[in-house]
Every structure is written in structure tokens, then in C-alpha cells.
Image (cartoon, grey):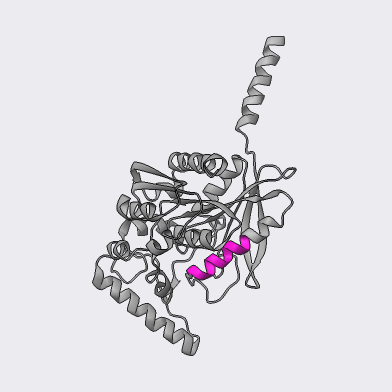
Amino acid sequence: MKQALIVVLLIFKIINMNAQTYTVEKINFKSNNQNVAGLLCNSDRKKKKPAVVILGPICSVKEQSPIQYATRLAEKGFVTLCFDARGYGESEGLPRQFESLKNKEEDVKSAISYLTARNDVEVNEIFIMGICNGTNEMMQVSIDDERIKAIALVSGNYLIKENMVHLLGDEKIWNTHLQRAKLAREKFEKTGNVEYIKIIDNKGSEQLLPPLPIYEWYYPWENKAPYFTYRGGWQNKVAAMSEWETLNFDALSVAKKISKPTLLIHGEMSDGGYEFAKQIFNSIPTKNKKSIWMDKTVHFQFYDDPRVIGQAVNEISNWFYQGNK
């Protein structure tokens, strides 16, 4: 009987060890006087802990790849925050679906201010991480905001002209997108009317992201059934003028100004492959930097593959705890 009880207790302990060790709370904070909706993940409210702000891919919402990292990093002992940028999902902001790097940079800084005001956050241990296109904004924020201790860049779609030409198809398409964005921006400034384009499509090159693999990954998000509301407010449209910012952004010039400890993780088949990620890494002047190169790894595995995300989170956690000294 005693042995049976011991076995039961051991099983209960194992189950407890594997149980969810974090909570997810819907929170709100202000950015430029507008309401931003976020998800705060935390494992223990009784003590101060380091915090991480997470920014996802272009046009993404918090329920996509950002929450995958937020929950796992919370299990590692961080207070984590991901959010819908202004104009997206549950957040306020007009125009809707306007992809503005400047706005997102402001939102990240506001998210940091929200975290530093909490009693469970160690204000001297603030970290940021960007996924895909979010790496570009996070590089800039790391330069602008002295409160940030270190940064992690995951599977970056770095806004380098050659990379974007490759992504869109060729230089003619790149130039067409840029000129369309210029005209849409001028129209908005004169009339207030917003022109929209699709983010994904399975034909043509007019959409924001023409490659077919991108369409195949995002398509289920567009065609979700009404009961899939847990997937967030992702919509297959973006303001055409958005590309005036994204296509004019120079990620290399930004990387050359980074002084914070930087971890860069990239897959062999991430956007741009190793070529452009290595350009970014080599341009970062700080000596306190580390790169992780993951062979035979596809870009979208950083969005939804538990094995790849788990490996990335382990590296990020170790870097934030130990590598930034």
C-alpha cells in the first residue's frame, strides 16, 4: 500500500512539473494616446522578474507567432508582453492596417513604459525581441531607448533593398510597389482616403508578399471559421502607402548603430537565407553579439514549429540571463 502511494505521489509530481506554469492576461496600455491591446504572460507575480517585449512579423497580430514566444519565455521566468500594434487587431488606431515602422517603434517604447510601471518587473532588466519584419523596428528601438539591456533578432526579414527585390520578384516589381505606395501616400495626405492591397494572394505580384509559401501559411488565418476567434484579428489587407516606409527603410544603416548586446538567430531558408542576415550581423559594431545559424530550417518554422521555437527560446533565455553581461 505504501509503495502504491509513493508511485501515485511521483506521478502527481511529474504531472505537476509538466503543468502550465504561467498565466496569460489581457492588458491595455496607451501609445500616442491610443489604446493598445496586449497579452501579458507571467509565471509569478510575487517577485520582480526581467521582462521581454515581443514584436512579430509584418501585419501580424499577437495571437500568431508572438504569443508562441511570450508563453515559452514566461516559463523561463520572464514577464513577457506581446500586443496588436496600433491599427491592427484589438488595438485602436487609424488608418486601420497601416504598416508603419515608426508607429510600431512608438508602441514598443510605450509597452516598455507599461512594464516598468508594474510591481513585478525589474526595471533594469528590460529586453526586446523581434520576429521576421519585427527585427527592423526592434533594432531601431534598441538604439533609441536606453532602458533596453539586450536584444534578440529571430529569422529577420531585414529591410535591405536587395533582399526586398528578391522577395518581391525583381527590381521592376520592387519599383512598381514603391511608386504605388508613393501615390497612395500622397492621396491619403490630400484626401484622407486609404487605398488597400492584399497582404497575400496565390497569383500575381501586386500583393504585399508575393511568394507562394507565404500565401500558403497565411491562407488559413484569412479563412478562419467564426469560432476561431482565438486566432486574433488578422485581416488580409494592408494600406498601400505602408510600403513607402518599409521599402525605404535601410536596415544596414540601422544595424551599424547598435550598441546593445545582440543575439541573432536565423534559418537557412528564412527570408533572405543566411546572406542578408550575415550582412546585418557583421554590421553590428558591438563586440557583445552572438549568432545562431540553423541549417535546413524554414522561415515559418520560427512561427509554429515547437522544436524550432523551443531551440530559439532556449538561446534567447540564456542570452538574456547570461550573454549580455
Q: Position of residue 135 (x, y in %)?
A: 45, 57
Q: Is residue 106 magenta?
A: yes
> Which residue is pictured at 44% across the width and 48% down the height?
287
Q: Is residue 170 magenta?
A: no
Q: Position of residue 281 (x, y in %)?
A: 38, 52
> Which residue is pictured at 43% across the width and 63% down the height?
254
Q: Is residue 13 left or right of residue 106?
A: right
Residue range in magenta is 101-111
Q: Image height check: is 188 above or below 148?
A: below
Q: Quadrant of the N terminus?
A: top right
User: Do we see residue 223 in this rendering?
Assistant: no
| Residue 291, picture quadrant | top left
Q: Is residue 46 left or right of residue 25?
A: right
Q: Is residue 41 left or right of residue 198?
A: right
Q: Position of residue 268 (x, y in %)?
A: 32, 46
Q: Quadrant of the C terminus?
A: top right
Q: Image height check: is 259 above or below 99?
A: above
Q: Position of residue 179 (x, y in %)?
A: 33, 79
Q: Image height check: is 295 above or below 192?
A: above
Q: Is residue 297 left or right of residue 43?
A: left
